[in-house]
Image: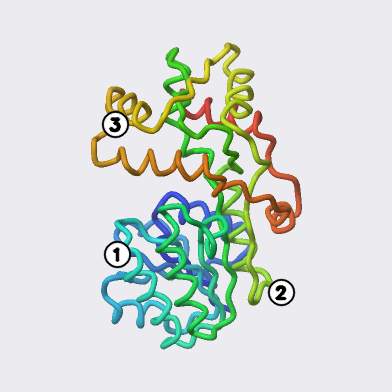
Amino acid sequence: MKLLVTGATGKLGTKIVETLLKTVPASQVAVSVRNPVKAESLRARGVDVRQGDFDRPESLDAAFTGIDRLLIISADGDTETRIRQHTNAAEAAARAKVGFIAYTSLANAADSKLFLAPPHQAAEQAILKTGIPYSFLRNNWYLENEASGIQGAKAGAPWVTSAGTGRVGWALQQEYAEAAAAVLAGSGHENTVYELSGPLLTQEQFVAELSAVLGKSIPVQQVDDDAYADIMKGAGVPEFLLPFLVGIQQGIRDGELAIESGDFEKLLGRPLTPLRDALNGLVQGLS
């Protein structure tokens, strides 16, 4: 049984591969990376390192050859680029006659109106079109995405948001990685959709946990989208990122991440790390 992870030198990919290697012999693990030099440390440990570029389908044909179970980690970039790359990967998997495809998707992807959804919707449709058994890992929100806000709070800044009472299912990226590894290396996951979400919390509830970890009260400043963009710009966020950040706030406010599910715990075989413990570890890492 040969398993392959794409994007294996990225933050999530690295965690997934390291998790796999705890239980799967390195000889059964392959990675597809755009720049194999970055994966030399994996090659030295016996992992099969292959060159694969989502914009060069012929490279994916070679990378996916002989692979039984494939994990496609969603690509970065603009919407058009991501749709093209995800489609290329699914089509290459079909040509290589891969036996199973797992894909890191987005919360409630098929019905989501979040601006991030179209590349995931396209990827899921492209995978379904192959007829290959699949598992869609619909990731909610990484706790690590809040690192800059946490650092600001540590420095005395308020928690600024335009998300209103919208709720988010935060969890550690490591736990998303462990869930993905469990599906890729496990059995019985054919034609499944897993909504991977932590307990749903509002911004105020999240900040209450962060306040407990930091040992000080952090004020929450609820503003409208324009004010949020202005405050983020004043904090040094590059202008091109502002629509992205505002779009996230809008999506949260509209309930796009308020997806309740016990799938995470089912895949991990244990409860998620409590948010306060997870935040404590993240804060220590930011020190």
Q: Report x, y in % for residue 258.
A: 61, 46
Q: Quadrant of the N terminus?
A: bottom right
Q: Residues within 10 Å of mark 2 (few under 14, many from 20)?
A: few
Under mark 3, the amino acid is Val
**Closest to the observer: 241 or 145?**
241
Marks 3, 2: nearer the viewer: 3
Distance in Å between CA atoms under marks 3 and 2: 44 Å
* Circle 1: element type: helix
Counting the numbered discs, the total is: 3
The residue carrying mark 3 is 237
Point out the tag, 1 or 2, that comes first from the N-terminus: 1
* Circle 3: element type: loop
The residue carrying mark 2 is 188
Under mark 1, the amino acid is Glu
* Circle 2: element type: loop
Q: Residues within 10 Å of mark 3 (few under 14, many from 20)?
A: some
Q: Which residue is drawn at 31% across and 23% down?
A: 235
Q: Residue at x 46, y 56 (%)?
A: 13
Q: In this view, does 59 lie above or below 141?
A: below
The residue carrying mark 1 is 80
Under mark 2, the amino acid is Gly
Distance in Å between CA atoms under marks 1 and 3: 24 Å
Distance in Å between CA atoms under marks 1 and 2: 33 Å
